[in-house]
Amino acid sequence: MEEILKVEGLGKTFTLSKKQQKLEKTKDKKRIAVNDLTFTAYKGEVFGLLGPNGAGKTTTLRMLATLIKPDQGDALIDGSSVIREPEQVRSKIGFLTSELKLEQFFTPNYLYDFFSGLYGVEPEVRDERKRKMFDRFGISEFAEVKVGNLSTGMKQKVSLVISLVHDPQIIIFDEPTNGLDVITAKVVTDFLLELKKDGKSIIVSTHIFSLIEKICDRVGIIIQGKMTVCDDLKSVTGEKTLEERFFEIYEETVGEAV
Amino acid sequence: MKNSILAIIKKEFVRFFGDKRMAIITIFLPGVLIYAMYSIMGEGMMGRMTADEDYIYNISVVNMPQSIEPMMKNLPFRVESAAEVNENERAKITNKETDLLVVFPEDFDAAVAAYDMKTSGEMAPQIEMFYNSTKTESSEVYRMMTEAFDSYESTLANKFDVNGGEGVYDLASKEDETGMIFSMMLPMLLLIFLFSGCMSIAPEAIAGEKERGTIATLLVTPMKRSHLALGKIISLGVIALLSGLSSFLGTMLSLPKMMGTESGTIGADVYGVNEYMMLLFIILTTVLVMVAALSVISAYAKSVKEASTAIMPLMVIVMLVAFSSMLGSGAPTEWYWYVIPFYNSVQCMNSIFAFAVLPVNIVITLLSNLVYVLFLAAGLAKMFDSEKIMYL
């Protein structure tokens, strides 16, 4: 199997402000968000990062997407280092999270062309790809409606489509179904499986067990910034459900039952 | 990919000009408002200083001499005779009922005829005029009568006249007069207009994008941070320039009215292509420095509101610097003054309007402004790359 993502000893520490210290009732000035994380994802698979809120999933994905810089370690995405070659990494990945917003003033059509331009997509390729994706997600009839006037679900679909304007081989998806209704969520998960069929490599983070069970080949469980288990989904769960296994692992790691 | 700078510029333009209301408010309105405001102010001031044309002045006269009476009859006066100067007559002036109270000595004509300045050791006969300076008509008639008595006095014993002919004696050229007034006023006004143009767009375009999370979407693309910074600065600069030029045009056209000289002694037409070209380059680089500085400040801010507050200190500094065009005697000639941002622009504009340009100082100003812009753009690019600034 070909390694597409290699994370080695990745670490990130945040400095807490006075206010945050008070809020979290701690005297520590530093908070280790991600602690010496090491894992590998292979070409053509869906890799899931599972963990509770605050475990460090989003921080990890942000480091992979080069939005923030790791304090320790490095990650190689298709051979490019997130620290030394962030621009190459950015051109290879499609990154989607609910924090990346689209300007309300513009139409999906305009934004698609604009971002295609930034990724250097040729106009003929762009138009063909746009038509296909807009049809696939039912955006066509809203193509000239300003993003600000679209429904939440439609906005999410437009964001998804625009994060893939350059047809990336690696897709990093933070909480793909968060805040979506069941129908839109299904559209998104189905699409992820479709992408996998096309041979793309996908990294998702989530705290939803069923999503992992449905789409992931391998899973890494992060608890308190550390990778506790990382293996094939089957090897992780064994005879039990993912949910049961997760709580066992959580208890072993944290030392107390939930 | 140089294209990404263009893509950003194009996007900002589509954003700005696509929103008709915003474009009108930022570009069209300032010039029109300034033109209207200055014109009205100018006319209002003129109106306050001159009385109505068909106004009849109320005048009280004590001891009207025969020699003066015919002169008074020819003027638009309603003349009343008063017996003597008393509190009552004075109160009428204070209460603005009467415009002027003229008091002649008894036997004025005889006293004037008898008086000889050389031989008599006494004071000349006195005419007293009481008026009220807070009433326009009263001041006006006071001025008229003073002039009339002066000329009457010189007809009594005319030895020589000064500037008695019909000729024009003030030989200052239109260039000089315009230069004097424009070089004082315009650099100050221009700098302030340009700055407020920048202020109305930069926080929105940088801090606003940060606040709404749309800048992060740009930052995950492979575009270089420096391209994003330059694209933003150039596009915002052009928009701010348009806004500033609109204000400038409004000012240029209405300033003659504001100064109350519609007779054509001052006007923007005295400047040639050279002056306007130099001015344009100075303004262009100044706007870029302003936009770059405001962008850096806005990038630090978490929200548009915070950005608007954070740029206040810079605004105060720019205002003070702008005021320097009103002070002193023209632009300094030493080159080193022209590396100080904003001050260099004000003084260059001052020298251009006053026809006192030193080309080397213009060049130093343009170059140092460009250096500042590049420096600030590099800083902005660094900030775009900083997770602490962009995502906290």
Image (cartoon, rainbow, N blue to C red):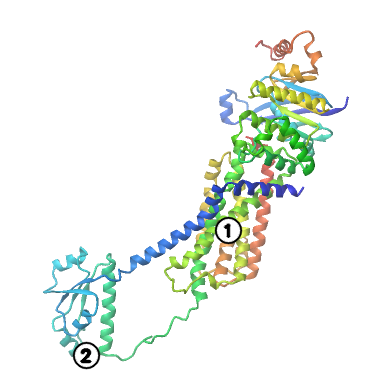
Q: Quadrant of residue B333?
A: bottom right
Work out whether residue B2 or residue A55 is closer to the camera in this orientation and state it. B2
Q: Is residue A155 above or below residue B50?
A: above
Q: What residue type is labelled 1?
A: Phe
Note whether residue A98 is visible: no
The residue beneath circle 2 is B116
Chain of residue at mark 2: B
User: Which amino acid does the dot numbered 2 rest on?
Assistant: Asp
Q: Position of residue A104 (x, y in %)?
A: 61, 38
Viewed as shown, does residue A93 lie left or right of A147? right
Please tell me how crowded label 1 is: few (under 14), some (14-19), or many (20+) other residues with Cα within 10 Å.
many
Chain on which label 1 sits: B
B237 sits to left or right of A35: left
Location of mark 1 (residue): B342
Label 2, secondary structure: give it.
Answer: loop
Do marks 2 and 1 share a chain? yes
Q: Is residue A141 left or right of residue B159?
A: right
